[in-house]
Image: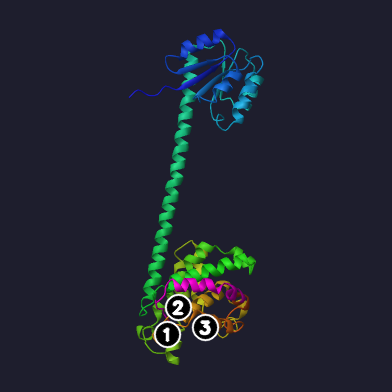
Amino acid sequence: MEAKRKIIFLVDDDITSLTIGKKVLAPFYDVATLNSGAVMLKMLENVIPELILLDVDMPEMDGYEAIKQLKASEKTASIPVIFLTSLNDEEMELKGLSFGATDYITKPFSPPLLLKRIELHLLIEEQKKELLFFNKNLTHMVEEKTKTVVELKNAILSTLAEVVEYRDELTGAHILRTQKYIKVLMDALKDNNIYEQEVARLDKELVLQSCQLHDVGKIAVKDSVLLKPDKLSSEEFELIKIHPAFGEKIILKLKEKTTDSDFVEYARIFAVAHHERWDGNGYPNGLKGEEIPLLGRIMAIADVYDALVTDRPYKKAFSHEKAVQIIAEGKGSHFDPALIDLFEKINYEFEKIAAGYKGETISR
């Protein structure tokens, strides 16, 4: 198949230059001979050439004004322009180059030199287009690869979290529910300018990924305790209480093998702090008030709500209304008062999420 011929505009008010130029170029290119800058600009409305040969010294609109208008349009700005001039003037050449010309050819031109210059600049343009195409595709390839890595990381996280959760008898969608509750709380914090500076420093996407590991420490708890169908004894409850600290240890091990420090730090906080209480009577560290990181205080609400509205082996699920009442009664003792005020405003969002998983069960 014959290659498509490239289009060249030859713009000059001198009929001799147009005639000679076309004779030289016509065997190799489709040549449009135009006798003024104005005619060239009009022609560009319908045809975009691969290159323009533009005379500098023309009446009415000289080459400088013509290239200025050509470069001002996004449609034509990238067309390479070679100036034609009968003067050998360094200052004039610099002026033309500053307006965006790619080269100068002195008239009367040598046909072999003219052809070689055109061939060179068309080759440069082809290479530029190939480079742009490569960069565009490389960016797309990198984005696709990054997307794949992120999806793989999320799959690994979800699977790890589910392995931990499914050691309980029937956990249902506890991880997904708490993740959705946290998203609702995070959005509401931002919308209501609560803990504004702390929220602004958090990467929401990483927060929602990392919260899946909040119960990873349950790996250390015996099956006889996790799977017990009755209420736990005080000794057994002490065994359950080791899981936040153990979860922190697991995640700190991950920190040694990754550079994703924000993600690991968020996961560590969720794991170790979600059983702390506002009044200091929580575990494992007995933190009080705002000593408890914000993510731990948020997870405390999400985790307790999910436990209340879902069946456990030793109790039936509470209604949404009862769960909201119990959580509200924990304001200032179990939970951050500012977060409870917010929760009471948006608890209907929690109800919708829980309703979407009706009939599921949850871990301890």
Which secondary structure lies at badge 2? helix
> What type of secondary structure mainly makes up the magenta span?
helix
Which quarter of the picture shows residue 287? bottom right
User: In which quadrant of the rendered image does the C terminus lie?
Assistant: bottom left
The numbered mark at residue 322 is 3
Spatial CA distance of label 3 from label 2 is 32 Å
Nearer-N-terminus badge (1/2): 2
Residue furthest to the top in view is: 16
Q: Where does residue 265 sit, x and y in percent of width and height?
A: 52, 68
Q: Where does residue 356 sit, x and y in percent of width and height?
A: 44, 71
- Residue linked to disc 1: 316
Q: Where does residue 78 sit, x and y in percent of width and height?
A: 54, 30
Q: Which region of the structure is painted magenta?
A: 341-363
Does 58 appear in magenta? Answer: no
The numbered mark at residue 246 is 2
Which secondary structure lies at badge 1? loop
The type of residue carrying mark 2 is Phe
Nearer-N-terminus badge (3/1): 1
In depth, the one of 339 and 322 nearer the eye is 322
In depth, the one of 107 and 77 nearer the eye is 77
The type of residue carrying mark 3 is Lys
The residue that appears at 56% across and 86% down in the rendered structure is 281
